[in-house]
Each structure stands twice: as structure tokens, then as C-alpha cells.
Image (cartoon, rainbow, N blue to C red):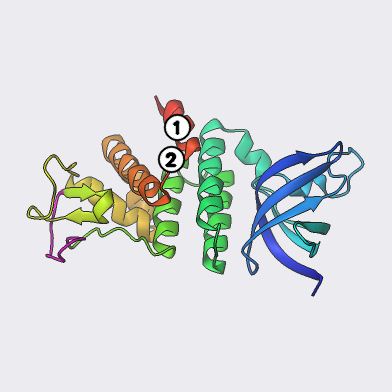
């Protein structure tokens, strides 16, 4: 049908002409959508503020030849202002939407949409440390995309753990026989934190030491960026803010 409705989170926007914007959105049922929102940069626009990055909306769109047209937008989650007010939340949210944009170039699932919305909601409310919310999102969305890291058995030969070498290129933990020379090692406490981030055990995550949190974040960043085949630019700004 030429007209359809869906729930969508705004990933990024680009100016078009004097008053319009091109939106890139991740929707619940239609995957990634690129659409034009006409007149939203005018102060008189009725729904311009509902179509900013990190906002979640119920949108009605008209299916166009190359870009769809936004006809209506009703706010479902106004997370943008609360996220933008805090540097760590803002940079974490940018890394999340950048990852979602990359992963959904081909296809997406409702679970990926819900995971992103849940992460942005948690960031806007400051429920946990921004970097921990980001790390949990990255691990979970990689798992949903078929790249779940091995955190117990050897990712290469299946030998049961415990193992201490984590090699992103090989899929996670590897045994001593499979680990290349000079492979990075991960402490048992940091490994336990990775497992907690993957399943959402926030009591353990919030109680983790700064050293384990930093080690887990570095491991997650290396793993996600390897599988995305290029760096997540926003992660660099988040790291700068933690120094």
C-alpha cells in the first residue's frame, strides 16, 4: 500500500532545501526507512520536534519511488533532550544509533528495534552508567545479528573453559592451543562482567570495579568494530570523555 504506519526511532537527519529534512529511521516492522519530512525546519511545523535524533514516534508515511514522505508523527518517546544534556549519554546514544544504522543496511528484526528503544530510554533516565548501557546494547545487538561472542567454550575448537584469551577475530574466548601468540587476556572478573552485560544482570554490572568496566568496554568495542568491519566513530568521543 502507498500509505503505511509504523513505530520508528530516528537515527540521523540531513537538511534538504530550506525547510525539509531527510530522516533515517529504524522501524519496528519495516526495517530501516529513509524518508523526507517536509517543512519540519520551520518554527510553525507541527511535528518537527518529534523527528529529531533519538526520538521515537508513531509515523504515517507515503511510499515514494526513492524516499518515502512523512505525513504524520505522534511522539512515543521523547528521549532526545534528556540525552543531549549529558555528554556521556549523548556520545553513547550516537554510538548506538550508528551501530543500528550499520547493522540494518540489509535487514532488521523487531527485536533490534526494541533493543535500541530500550537502550535510549535507559540512557535518557540515567538508569545506569552510559558506557555500561552502550556495552550491553552492543553485545546484545551483535548476538541478535548472529555474532554472539563465545564467553565460555573455545570459539574455535569448542574446548570447555575456563579460558583467558579473547580474540575478536576468532569469535571470543579461545583455548591455549587455538590462541595466537600475543593474544589479549581477560581477567575472570571482567569476563563475568561481559556475561552480565549480555544477559542484563544490572546488579552485577553496577557493582563492577572501574578496572573491570574499562576492560570489558575495550573488549566489547574491539569485538563490535571488528564485525562491523569499520570503526564506530562515536566510540572515540566517548573514550575521550572518560579520560
Q: In the rendering, at what x and y percent does residue 162 appear?
A: 12, 57
134 relative to 211 in the view: left or right: right
Q: In the rendering, at what x and y percent does residue 112 appear?
A: 52, 62
- The verdict on residue 180 being magenta is no
Instruction: Name the mark nearer the viewer: 1 or 2.
Output: 2
Q: Secondary structure at mark 2?
A: loop
Q: Quadrant of residue 4?
A: bottom right
List the single residue furthest toward the right. 44
Q: Is residue 150 above or below residue 165?
A: below
Circle number at residue 231: 2
Q: Main secondary structure of the magenta part?
A: loop
Q: Which sits in the foreground, 71 or 190? A: 71
List the single residue furthest toward the front. 65
Q: Quadrant of residue 182?
A: top left
Q: In the rendering, at what x and y percent does residue 78 appear?
A: 69, 49
Mark 1 Cα-neighbour bin, 10 Å: few <14, some 14–19, many ≥20: few
The residue drawn where x is 18% and y is 61% is 156
Mark 2 Cα-neighbour bin, 10 Å: few <14, some 14–19, many ≥20: some
Q: Quadrant of residue 113?
A: bottom right
Screen quadrant of the C terminus: top left
126 relative to 25 in the view: left or right: left
List the single residue furthest toward the bottom. 1
The residue drawn where x is 75% and y is 47% is 22
The residue drawn where x is 59% and y is 45% is 124
Q: Are marks 1 and 2 in contact (CB under 8 Å)?
A: yes
- The verdict on residue 162 being magenta is yes
Q: Which residue is mark 1?
A: 236
Q: CA distance from mark 1 to mark 2?
A: 9 Å
- Between disc 1 and disc 2, whose residue precedes? 2
Q: Is residue 73 visible?
A: no
Q: Which residues are magenta?
A: 154-164
Amino acid at each position: 500500500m502507498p500509505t503505511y504506519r509504523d513505530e520508528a526511532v530516528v537515527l540521523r537527519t540531513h537538511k534538504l532545501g530550506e525547510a525539509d529534512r531527510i530522516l533515517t529511521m529504524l522501524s519496528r516492522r519495516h526495517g530501516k526507512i529513509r524518508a523526507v519530512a517536509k517543512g519540519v525546519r520551520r518554527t510553525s511545523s507541527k511535528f518537527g520536534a518529534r523527528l529529531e535524533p533519538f526520538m521515537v514516534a508513531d509515523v504515517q508515511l507515503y511510499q515514494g519511488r526513492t524516499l518515502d514522505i512523512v505525513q504524520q508523527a505522534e511522539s512515543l518517546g521523547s528521549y532526545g533532550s534528556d540525552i543531549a544534556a549529558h555528554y556521556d549519554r549523548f556520545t553513547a546514544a550516537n554510538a548506538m544509533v550508528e551501530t543500528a544504522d550499520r547493522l540494518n543496511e540489509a535487514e532488521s528484526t523487531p527485536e533490534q528495534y526494541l533493543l535500541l528503544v530500550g537502550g535510549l530510554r535507559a540512557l535518557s533516565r540515567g538508569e545506569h552508567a552510559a558506557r555500561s548501557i552502550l556495552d550491553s546494547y552492543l553485545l546484545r545487538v551483535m548476538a541478535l545479528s548472529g555474532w554472539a561472542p563465545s564467553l565460555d567454550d573455545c570459539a574455535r575448537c569448542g574446548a570447555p573453559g575456563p579460558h583467558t584469551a579473547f580474540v575478536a577475530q576468532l569469535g571470543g574466548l579461545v583455548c591455549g592451543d587455538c590462541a595466537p601468540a600475543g593474544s589479549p587476556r581477560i581477567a575472570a572478573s571482567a569476563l563475568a562482567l561481559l556475561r552480565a552485560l549480555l544477559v542484563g544482570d544490572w546488579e552485577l554490572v553496577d557493582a563492577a570495579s572501574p578496572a573491570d568496566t574499562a576492560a570489558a568496554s575495550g573488549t566489547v568495542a574491539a569485538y563490535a568494530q571488528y564485525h562491523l568491519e569499520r570503526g564506530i566513530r562515536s566510540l572515540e568521543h566517548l573514550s575521550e570523555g572518560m579520560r
